[in-house]
Structures are given as C-alpha cells and as structure tokens.
Image (cartoon, rainbow, N blue to C red):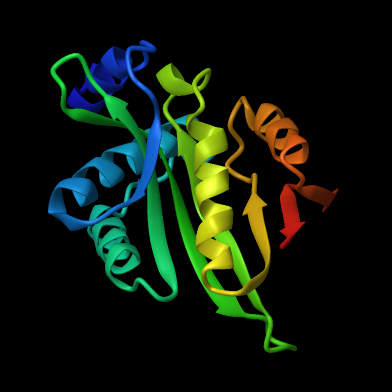
Amino acid sequence: MNDIATQQAKAATPSSAVRVRLAEGEADERVIFDLCVLAMRESKYKDLPLAADRLRQQIHHDITAKKTNGIILAERLGPDGNPVVLGLLSAIAGRLQFSEAISCAALIFYVAPEARNSRAALLLLKAFEKWALNRSAYEIAVHVTMGREDDARVSVLLERYGFLNPGGGSHFKRL
C-alpha cells in the first residue's frame, strides 16, 4: 500500500470529524496528485499512460487561479494528530457561451475507498455549492463519467442532494 493509501486507511476510522477546506501550497499539490492517480486507477482510464507533468501543472493552476478554479479537500485528523486528506473536488467556474450566467463544474469528484462511508462526499458537495455561490453561479454540475464501479452510488448521492440528471452522467443543480 502506498503512503497516501496507508494514511487514508488510518483516517477512515471515525476518530475525528471530517472538515473541508480549499487546497493551497505544495504539500496539498502532492496529496492531490496522489488522489488523482488513485482515481485514475479506479476508472475506465486505468490503462492509459499517466501524463504526470501535465497533471502537476493543472493541479498548480487549479490551486492558484482562485477566481475561476479551486480544489476543495475533505480531511480529518489522523491518529498522530496530523490532517489526512480523504477526498477532493476540483472546481471550475465560467460563463455560459450564450449568456452572462456563470456555471460551475466539478472536474474531479473523488473520495478514497476507505472514506466512502464517511461524510466526506456530502461535505465536498456542500463546499462546492458554497464556492459556486461565492462566484454568483447560476448552477453547479457534476459529471459522473469516470466509469468507476460506484458511479451509480455517486449518482444516487447527487440526486439525494438535489441534483437533477437529465440523462447520461451529467447532474445539475440550479442555485
């Protein structure tokens, strides 16, 4: 088991509350990279070569372009008292092509397997909604298109949280 998976397994115990925050700094960039690799390994893209440099550049951009991008992390304190990241939601905001309205989309929404029965996913969605409202967004969108085994479970969670699924893997919530 790699370092991040070991930390996540330790953090999966309900010893402390899950909290969310915006990612910042190099330490977060490294953890986000590892989580993205885990997400890719669980997805239909697992056989594709990883573009590690491009992924690192994208993560750095998403953390530093705070007006239009952000990566929200869910974490809890591990047994040693240090925070352990359980999941992430990478968000982007932009104007619709045909309107001045802003739409925000989750580019990656991922919770490590060991934390999937925690509140991490729900708290990430709530933080995403708040992030979008702070940008005066018209809607938020989560696209469940990674081809993972639990995509149906994610869709149920989104619908319970008020997202509509007009078809396919896209889920929208008007704010």
| Residue under the point 42% across and 68% down | 69
- Residue 175 versus residue 93: which sits nearer the camera? 175
Q: Quadrant of residue 162?
A: top right
Figure quadrant of the N terminus: top left
169 relative to 125 in the view: left or right: right
Against 14, residue 18 (above or below) is below
| Image position of 135 with respect to 54: above or below | below
Q: Nearer the viewer, residue 81 or 46?
A: 81
User: For the point 40% across and 76% down, which residue is it?
Assistant: 67
Q: Position of residue 3 (x, y in %)?
A: 18, 24
Q: How many marks?
A: 0
Left or right: 142, with 86 as reference point: right
Q: Residue at x 29, y 53 (%)?
A: 23
Q: Is residue 142 above or below residue 156?
A: below
Relative image position of residue 166 (x, y in whole percent): 86, 53
Residue 156, visible in the rendered structure: yes
Q: Is residue 167 visible?
A: no
Residue 47: x percent and y percent?
Answer: 44, 38
Asked whether, in this view, residue 28 is left or right of residue 106, the answer is left
Which quadrant of the view contains residue 129? bottom right
Image quadrant assignment for residue 40: top left
Please give the name of the residue rendered at 76% of the width and 35% of the height, measured from the top-left corner: 160
